[in-house]
């Protein structure tokens, strides 16, 4: 693969859905692909983190509600699209718009370029510079696991959502599923079909009404985006309604009675867990479905002040470093910006700001 150019006007770090959406708008704005801008992605193959998610994962919403700008995701036959359909869509999307993605290229460090307003990027494929950097590295590569008392004594298997692919590997085991979000509920639903499961959450799980799927989530996020951009009071995100979407597998699990959750008032022992009432339960595997943190280690050399664990942003613009944008990680980079449609929406305004910065 040829070396990177010595300089670009815009470098996008990460070519998952968020990076691709930015690439689409940069191209549409007339920037020359591969010369003016490039996308650097650490993966071997297209699809961002979708290619690593568990085998049975499907979207929360129909294909038509899960699209990047320009080209709607092709419909899926029955139900919501599976993971591989999303990966295929992203692969075809970047080919369709001939987006200049270079992979595998990992950006190791972004620093201030001496004597200019721009940045130096140290990568696995050499060094380059850029006037603008868009960080769109997602969260999948930074799984989060909270500390629980005694866990260092536990000698069984510990997995995180990122390690899980299909239930067969846990067949006939005693599995403790930790976490109160969608990943926990969905993995519990399928693991409980082949294993004996216990669910642990820090508070009672909050299920959304059965008829709420991704469409309603995206409507709430869109309403919020409109209100905020119109200077209206924040109507709040979806969290006010609940956390867990009752997808068909979760619904089936509920009817089998496996969705009762226990609080984590306990400590782990070598072979399991002791509950607050003194009862002890043997555990073969702890499955941590405890979320993610933004993958931002490449930005560490910029020493940006942090707010709630991430650089301070206004929309997707880093308020403490002109020319730096962050896209896709969560609501702190725009309502719903970690979702497919949300990435599309925030990328559009980001590119508007990038053009202003370049001129
Ligand atoms: P990613 O897909 O993680 O892409 C980031 C890319 O950057 C990756 O290719 C990564 O390798 C690369 N990278 C990271 N660090 C570097 C570096 N230093 N240098 C170069 N490259 C780097 N959203 C929906 O819209 N609908 C859903 O139904 C839905 N379901 C979800 C289910 C689960 C279990 C999860 C975890 C998320 C779900 N999401 C859903 C949310 C969201 O769409 C995904 O998390 C999505 O993958 C985020 O896209 P991204 O582009 O921000 O990050």
Image (cartoon, grey):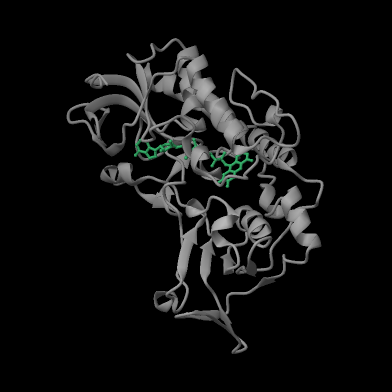
* In the depicted structure, whether residue 169 falls above or below residue 223: below
Residue ID at (47%, 33%): 16
Which quadrant would the C terminus be assigned to in this image? top left
Q: Position of residue 108 (x, y in %)?
A: 27, 40
Q: Position of residue 338 (x, y in %)?
A: 55, 40
Q: Residue furthest left?
A: 115
Q: Position of residue 161 (x, y in %)?
A: 52, 54
Direction from residue 30 to residue 337 in the image, left or right = right
In terms of image quadrants, where is residue 5?
top left
* In the depicted structure, whether residue 3 falls above or below residue 226: above
Depth check: give the residue in front, 254 or 24: 254
Which quadrant would the N terminus be assigned to in this image? top left
Asked if residue 294 shows in the view, the reply is: yes
Q: How many labels sit on residues? A: 0
Asked if residue 146 shows in the view, the reply is: no
Q: Residue furthest bottom?
A: 278
Q: Position of residue 197 (x, y in %)?
A: 64, 68
Residue ID at (45%, 14%): 98
């Amino acid at each position: 693969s040829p070396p990177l150019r010595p300089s670009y006007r815009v470098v996008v770090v990460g070519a998952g859905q968020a990076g691709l959406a930015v690439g689409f708008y940069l191209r549409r704005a007339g920037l020359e692909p591969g010369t003016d801008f490039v996308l650097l992605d650490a993966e071997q193959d297209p699809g961002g983190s979708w290619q690593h998610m568990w085998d049975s994962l499907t979207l929360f919403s129909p294909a038509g509600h899960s699209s990047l700008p320009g080209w709607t995701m092709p419909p899926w036959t029955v139900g919501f699209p599976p993971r591989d359909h999303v990966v295929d869509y992203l692969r075809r999307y970047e080919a369709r718009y001939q987006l200049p993605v270079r992979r595998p290229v990992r950006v190791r460090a972004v620093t201030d370029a001496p004597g200019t307003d721009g940045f130096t990027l140290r990568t696995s494929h050499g060094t380059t510079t850029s006037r603008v950097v868009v960080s769109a590295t997602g969260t999948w590569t930074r799984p989060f696991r909270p500390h629980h008392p005694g866990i260092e004594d536990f000698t069984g298997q510990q997995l995180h959502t990122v390690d899980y692919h299909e239930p067969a590997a846990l067949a006939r085991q005693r599995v403790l599923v930790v976490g109160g979000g969608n990943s926990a509920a969905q993995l519990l639903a399928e693991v409980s079909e082949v294993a004996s499961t216990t669910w642990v959450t820090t508070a009672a799980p909050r299920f959304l009404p059965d008829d709420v799927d991704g469409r309603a989530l995206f409507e709430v996020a869109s309403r919020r985006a409109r209100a905020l951009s119109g200077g209206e009071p924040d109507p709040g995100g979806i969290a006010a309604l609940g956390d867990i979407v009752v997808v068909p597998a979760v619904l089936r699990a509920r009817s089998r009675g496996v969705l009762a959750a226990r609080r984590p008032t306990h400590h782990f022992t070598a072979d399991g867990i002791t509950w607050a009432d003194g009862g002890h339960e043997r555990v073969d595997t702890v499955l941590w479905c405890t979320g993610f943190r933004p993958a931002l280690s490449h930005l560490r050399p910029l020493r940006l002040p942090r707010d709630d664990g991430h650089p301070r942003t206004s929309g997707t613009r880093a308020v403490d470093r002109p020319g730096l944008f962050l896209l896709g990680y969560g609501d702190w980079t725009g309502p719903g910006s970690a979702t497919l449609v949300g990435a599309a929406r925030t990328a559009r305004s980001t590119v508007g700001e990038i053009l202003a910065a370049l001129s």
